[in-house]
Amino acid sequence: MVATREHVEADTRTRLLASTATLIHAGSYQAVGVRAICEHAGVQRGSFYHFFASKQALVLDTIDEMWKAYVDEVGSCFDSSLPPRERIEALFDHAYRTHSEIREQTGHVLGSPFCNLAAEASTLDEPIRDRVLGIFDEWATLIEEPISAAQVAGELDPTISAEDMSWTLLSALLGALVVAKAANDTTFIPVVGREVVATLWARAAA
Amino acid sequence: MVATREHVEADTRTRLLASTATLIHAGSYQAVGVRAICEHAGVQRGSFYHFFASKQALVLDTIDEMWKAYVDEVGSCFDSSLPPRERIEALFDHAYRTHSEIREQTGHVLGSPFCNLAAEASTLDEPIRDRVLGIFDEWATLIEEPISAAQVAGELDPTISAEDMSWTLLSALLGALVVAKAANDTTFIPVVGREVVATLWARAAA
């Protein structure tokens, strides 16, 4: 196959996004500059601005790509053929598996890239704060579905606000990832997952 | 009173610590350099290294000072004369009040400085990761006390691991602060606090 100009451009853009995701996740938003991203991606710095107006624009697109990849991966956790409780357990299991693999590969628990960006960049970069908030909102909506399903199935107290509870579970997951990052130890993730699920399902329908 | 050299030195050191806490909390670890800290503190850059070997050393001491201040403030939340459930509620109330005040003053929800440092710097700076982990450990120990007390009082299922539950509650609190920072809206904090407490106390002693 002859590489057309479109192919090369798509490949260059994809490499820039992948390098940004890797470098920011391993380091931080501010620790990584355009020069390092271009070097990692094997892209001439001069052609960077053909694809992205700024590092911020690149990071915004990277956030979207990381979120798409995350949703593809966890999609099976939200398979509506699974019992609702297992879907929530699968979400924490997925986090444990993913972050344990990353630790094996890099030596570090890197945490959630969305959570890291929220913690680091929210006060420094308004468009990034806003994009991450949009992702948290979609994430909470994903989590809300099995909670509502458990209420419909008579497993959970129907007076619980599924929306408030979904933000609570998301908070517990994000917090567990921060603790795991500080500890460089993923075993905090299933501990929190187990307690969250056991506790929530104790709040059974009366 | 005549300012002795000791007084002046103690004051300079205190100003450097206070400026570091303020600037890093408002920005990030990497966004703030020694020059900006000295300017904010009104300290000659040349005399900085009389007090601290490096920015890292300054930040480690700042973390300790911030933690001391936090424990002084939330001490009343852990007053053992309060019912255990109210102590946990008071912890989230304290976070809501504190971060709402900061938002009033600065226009931004800044999040937990410990959580921000864990998320930003854990993979970049091992001594800072380790110091923040020590603080998370002390924080979880503070939270464990009312959980154990509620078990002794027959309010909570005695088979719950108070230690695991304390890390779960800490995760929920840290995660709520990250979400509040991304949303620039503190109302997530009491929502999560209310759901955490209502859910945990539904896991009553059988």
Image (cartoon, coloured by chain):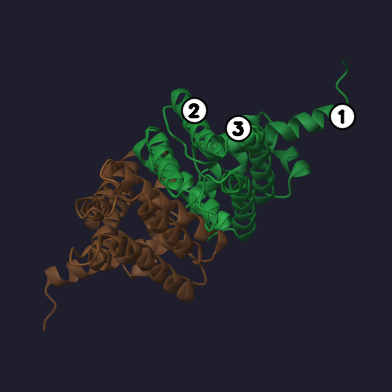
Chain colours: A green, B brown
Query: Which mark sits nearer the N-terminus, 1 or 2?
Result: 1
Amino acid identity at mark 3: Leu
Amino acid identity at mark 1: Arg
Q: Are marks 1 and 2 in contact (CB under 8 Å)?
A: no
Whether residue B38 can be seen here: no
Q: Residue B4: image x %, image y %?
A: 11, 74
Query: Which mark sits nearer the N-terminus, 3 or 1?
Result: 1
Can you identify the residue that label 3 sits on?
A82
Q: Residue placed farthest to the front in the image?
A: A206
Taking the image as shown, residue A167 lies to the left or right of residue B9, namely right
Instruction: Assess disc 1: are there few (<14), some (14-19) or many (≥20) residues with their C-alpha within 10 Å of its C-alpha.
Output: few
Instruction: Assess disc 2: are there few (<14), some (14-19) or many (≥20) residues with their C-alpha within 10 Å of its C-alpha.
Output: some
Q: Chain of mark 1?
A: A
Q: Chain of mark 3?
A: A
Q: Residue A142: image x %, image y %?
A: 62, 45
Can you identify the residue that label 2 sits on?
A97
Whether residue B179 can be seen here: yes
Instruction: Assess disc 3: are there few (<14), some (14-19) or many (≥20) residues with their C-alpha within 10 Å of its C-alpha.
Output: some
Q: Chain of mark 2?
A: A
Query: Which mark sits nearer the N-terminus, 3 or 2?
Result: 3
Closest to the observer: B33 or B25? B25
Secondary element type, mark 3? loop
Can you identify the residue that label 1 sits on?
A5
Closest to the observer: B19 or A143? A143
Amino acid identity at mark 2: Arg
* Cα–Cα gap, marks 3 and 2: 19 Å
Closest to the observer: B36 or A115? A115
* Cα–Cα gap, marks 3 and 1: 45 Å
**B64 versus A84 height, above or below:** below
